[in-house]
Amino acid sequence: MLIPATILTGFLGSGKTTLLKRVLTEAHGQKIAIIENEFGEENIDNEILVSDTNEQIIQMNNGCVCCSIREDLRTTLQLLAAKKRKGLLDFDRVVIETTGLADPGPVAQTFFMDDEIAESFLLDSILTLVDAKHAAQQLNDRQEARRQVGFADQIFISKADLVTPAELDALQHRLKHMNPRAPQKVVHFGEVSLTEVFDLRGFNLNAKLDIDPDFLVDDDHHHHDGEHCDHPSHKHGHAHHAHHDHAHGEHCDHPSHAHDHGPGHHHHHDDDVKSFVYKSKRQFDPAKLEDFLGAIVNIYGPKMLRYKGVLNMKGTEKKVIFQGVHQLMGSDLGPDWAEGEERISKMVFIGIDLPKDILIQGLDQSLV
């Protein structure tokens, strides 16, 4: 049985410790090993955590995660797995709490790059905690904050009671454009039910591609109701895909978006972490698509945070599922397309300044 691991990320002061304590108090019958990677005054929290619960806390005291996480995290995980095998330590799952400035990328990659880790652990999901009160400023000022949003499988927004409904709305809008695949939940004082924290299967190759439906609606009224893939020449699909940001930047004139003018909102189309969705009803040519995605990941991998697709592929009656983190990409055959189900490929890419026009052109050229 693989040991599930959850990565908890978010800025200092966003309430990670509160959330963690809450989870530990509620996790009846589950033993959790916590790997902390904090530095500075945050360490005081360890005392509280240790005394409140029987959890094992392993403090990685090298301070910053950014550069060296792989090695020390790998060592820590290997140690934990070995102790569990020998019966020296009893735990059901692992939570890795990263420092407020950490890039979750290397942490996530550790689970895939290292065979020994992959044999013992299953990376379940990345949770990102966003502090509503300071988010606009943090997202404007710090790329790490934007990256954490882009990586998330689930976003929790704390301190929402300290901002106006309009500010909260603007923030949620902004987060959605950065990451339309992570559900957002507003939480009070870290009150989150365990079902929203564990076993989310964010890294599973499953045939579901959750993209926030509002994100698609948003796009659709700029994109001829999303039908552009039917056009025989497929040509005009490019223009409005490529102008996607402009559409978002301008949509403030649209009556239904009047409420968007919250503080910080007008920044959102400048965020370097962006997402876009690609859809087509034509089948992909497997060889062409593999070549293209391989090339893209080689060049832009460091800037690609998370990406996933459920594809209609020539030569198989099954859905093809692919997903990736940075340069690591995996794909698998999913279930059959259901009787009468529309066979439409959908992909979402989340990354830093990704060249949307190059991606769209390459994907278009990979169609049969």
Image (cartoon, rainbow, N blue to C red):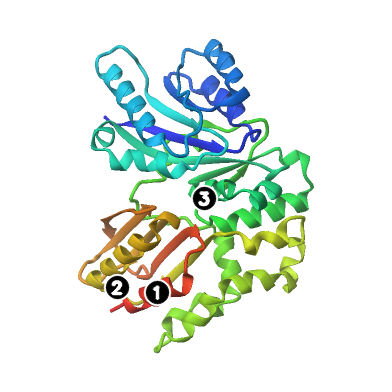
Q: Amino acid at mark 3?
A: Ala
CA separation, marks 2 and 3?
26 Å
Whether residue 32 is situated above or below residue 339 in the rendered picture: above
Q: Amino acid at mark 2?
A: Phe
Q: Residue at x 60, y 75 (%)?
A: 221
Q: Earlier in the sequence, mark 3 or mark 1?
A: 3
Q: Which mark is residue 284?
A: 2
CA separation, marks 3 and 1?
22 Å
Please tell me how crowded label 3 is: few (under 14), some (14-19), or many (20+) other residues with Cα within 10 Å.
many
Q: Disc 1 vs disc 2: Cβ atoms closer than 8 Å? A: yes
Q: Is residue 304 visible?
A: no
Q: Residue at x 79, y 47 (%)?
A: 164
Q: Quick one: quadrant of the C terminus?
A: bottom left
> Residue 27: percent from the left, percent from the top?
49, 23
Whether residue 11 is situated above or below residue 265 in the rendered picture: above
Whether residue 113 is situated above or below residue 351 in the rendered picture: above
> Residue 171: percent from the left, percent from the top?
68, 52
> Residue 64: percent from the left, percent from the top?
50, 33
Q: Is residue 123 left or right of residue 270?
A: left
Q: Residue at x 20, y 70 (%)?
A: 315
- Residue that badge 1 annotates: 280
- Residue that badge 3 annotates: 182
Q: Is residue 247 left or right of residue 237?
A: right
